Amino acid sequence: MLGKIGVALFVNKILDISKGEIVEGVGSARFTVTFDCVVLRPEVGEVVDGIVEIAAQEVIRAKYGPLDVVLTLSHLPADYKYSPDAEGFVSQDGGVVIKKESRVRCRIFSVKYRIRNAEWTCSIVASMQGTGLGVL
C-alpha cells in the first residue's frame, strides 16, 4: 500500500535512491526511493469483477486483484438466501449460486484507507444490487 494513493502493482522504473542512513539500535539502513509504478486505486462507483473466497451466512468476501471486497446481506439482491447445502447464496428460482470460486461483478460504494499495526490497509464494501451486477 502506498498510503491513500493505492496499491503498487509493480515498479516500472527506479528514478532515484538517496544515500542510506543507519537506523540506530536496529542494524538496518533507511533509503528514500523515488520510482514510477502502476497503482490500483479503487474508486466509489467503480464496477469491478472479483472471485469469491468466502460465502458465509452473513457475508461474502471476494478478491479483487490484491484487495478484498466485502458484500453483506443487505448488498445482495433480495431474492438470494444462504443455503448451507449449497455452501453459498442461492437465487429464489435456484438457478444461480454464489459460492467459493464464483466470479462476481459488483459496484464499490465505500473505500476506506486505514493504518493498522503501522501499515496501510484498504477496506472495500460493494453491492451486487443493480443492472449488470451479480454472478458472471
Image (spheres, helix red, strand yellow):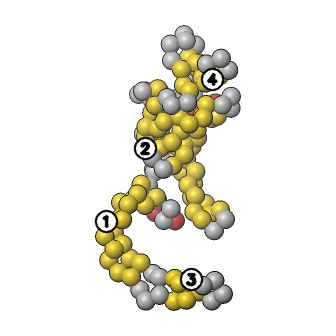
From the image, state whether disc 4 or disc 2 is nearer to you.
4
Q: Position of residue 127 (x, y in %)?
A: 53, 35
Q: State whether residue 12 appears in this view.
A: yes
Q: State whether residue 106 appears in this view.
A: no
The amino acid marked with disc number 2 is Glu
Q: Secondary structure at mark 1?
A: strand
Q: Quadrant of residue 97?
A: top right
The crowd level at tag 1 (other Cα within 10 Å; few <14, some 14-19, many 20+) is few
Task: Check disc 1 and report the residue beneath it.
Answer: 12
The amino acid marked with disc number 3 is Ser
Q: Is residue 25 above or below residue 97?
A: below
Distance from disc 4 to disc 3, alpha carbons, whole Å, reads 48 Å
Distance from disc 3 to disc 1, alpha carbons, whole Å, reads 26 Å
In the picture as drawn, the residue positioned furthest to the top comes out as 93
68 or 113: which is nearer to us?
68
Task: Check disc 4 and report the residue beneath it.
Answer: 87
From the image, state whether disc 1 or disc 2 is nearer to you.
1
Of the two numbered discs 3 and 1 on the same chain, state the one appearing first in sequence.
Answer: 1
90 or 109: which is nearer to us?
90
Q: Position of residue 96 (x, y in %)?
A: 51, 18
Task: Check disc 2 and report the residue beneath it.
Answer: 46
Task: Check disc 3 and report the residue beneath it.
Answer: 28
Distance from disc 3 to disc 2, alpha carbons, whole Å, reads 41 Å
Q: Quadrant of residue 33?
A: bottom left
Query: Is 11 placed left or right of 92 in the picture?
Result: left
Q: Given contact means CB atoms under 8 Å apart, are the residues at marks 4 and 3 in contact?
A: no
The amino acid marked with disc number 1 is Asn
Numbered tag placed on residue 108 in the rendering:
none
